[in-house]
Amino acid sequence: MLTVNIDPETEKALTELTSDGRSATDVIREAIRRAAWRRHMELAELDAKRLASDPEDRAEAQAIMRDMEDLRAW
């Protein structure tokens, strides 16, 4: 169980999000899942940027691409 104190702005948003008949519980669950997904994507983006700026990783990726060139269909 989770107890949350919300401010008037959040209460208004929750009212709007439940106006289609969904329960507050369902709306909050979805919001938490979406926030977790966004966080996952943010971390993936940071990792991709880190790898893109790593000269060793870039060299390895380029070597792999050269090795795979013979496997291209076109």
Image (cartoon, rainbow, N blue to C red):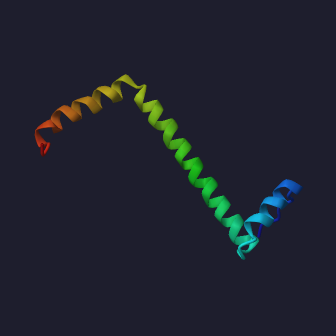
Residue 19 in the image: above or below residue 69: below
Q: Going by the picture, which residue comes out furthest to the bottom?
A: 21
Q: Going by the picture, which residue comes out furthest to the right?
A: 8
Near-viewer residue (25 or 74): 74
Quarter of the image with the C terminus in it = top left
Report whether 73 appears left or right of 29. Answer: left
Quarter of the view holding residue 32: bottom right
Quarter of the view holding residue 48: top left
Near-viewer residue (45 or 20): 20
Q: Going by the picture, which residue comes out furthest to the top?
A: 55
Near-viewer residue (38 or 57): 38
Quarter of the image with the N terminus in it = bottom right
Q: Position of residue 34 (x, y in %)?
A: 61, 57
The residue located at (78%, 59%) in the rendering is 13
Q: Position of residue 4 (x, y in %)?
A: 83, 61
Total labels: the figure holds 0
The residue located at (55%, 43%) in the rendering is 42
Q: Position of residue 50 (x, y in %)?
A: 47, 31
The residue located at (87%, 59%) in the rendering is 5
Report whether 46 appears left or right of 72. Answer: right
Residue 5 in the image: above or below residue 65: below
The residue located at (75%, 71%) in the rendering is 19
